[in-house]
Amino acid sequence: MSEQDKPLLIKRYASRRLYNTETSDYVTLEDIASFIREGREVQIIDLKSGDDLTRQYLLQIIAEHESRGENVLPINVLTDLVRSYTNQAQSFVPDFLAMSFDMLRDGQSKMMENLTTIPNPMSAMPGFEAMQAQQKAFLKAMTGGWSESSGPQPERDAAASELDEIKSQLADLQAKLSRLKD
């Protein structure tokens, strides 16, 4: 197993300082977050007791990012997570979240693959056609049914010719009225 494949071991000393065993130096929570963003697995162990503190520190990293305004988790998701600790949902929530993030990672990987192999990478995304149909329906609703194309439309052509005819009739009536006055 290569160094990058096994988790980076971080030891927490009694002083609460975090020690990177690979580089033999102290690290901060932000350093640990950087390792994780780079794709590295991290394991944080209490030196004295041997307890695995990884979950606690990962939650602390998330809390710090959220408190700085880097809101990734919407309030309703946070609320549902709190609820899951107080009811029967607790049993399936971890599996559901894990599967959801696996699907997200897989989708991102497939999208990145498709960027180089398909002329329109978005068309390969699952549900792309449905998303396009929804966008078209939304645009149609927002524009009052106007077409998206810039060319003349049959309905517009018919309306324009009716308007031209009415203008012509109005001009004829005005001309007749002018003759009657004379």
Image (cartoon, grey):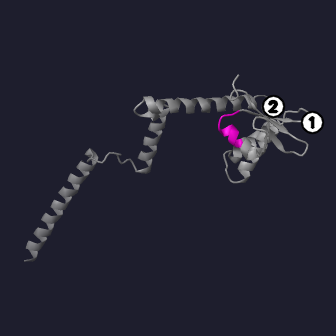
Q: Quadrant of the N terminus?
A: top right
| Residue 19: image tag | none
Horizontal arrangement in the rendering, residue 14 relative to residue 89 (left or right): right
Residue beneath the point at 69% across and 39% down: 35
Q: Residue beneath label 2, please?
A: 88
Q: Position of residue 182 (x, y in %)?
A: 7, 77
Residue 64 position in % (x across, y down): 75, 49
Query: In the image as oriented, which residue stretches furthest toward the front?
Result: 24
Q: Which residue is mark 1?
A: 48
Q: Look at label 1 and name its amino acid.
A: Lys
Decide: is 147 above or below 177: above
SS for dot 1: loop
Which residues make up the magenta segment?
33-40
Residue 129 appears at what percent x and percent y?
Answer: 45, 33
Q: Dot 2: few (<14), some (14–19), or many (≥20) neighbours within 10 Å?
A: few
Task: Kindly identify the residue that appears in the image at 70 percent across and 30 percent down.
Answer: 98
Query: On screen, 7 above or below 139?
Result: above
Q: Residue 17: where, in percent of width, then height? A: 84, 45
- The answer to whether 97 appears left or right of 151 in the picture is right
Between 180 and 123, the one lying in front of the other is 123
Instruction: Look at the picture and state if 108 lies above or below 75.
Output: above
> Does the image show residue 126?
no
- On screen, residue 47 versus residue 142, left or right, reads right
In depth, the one of 6 and 69 nearer the eye is 6
Marks 1 and 2 sit apart, C-alpha to C-alpha, by 35 Å
Under mark 2, the amino acid is Gln
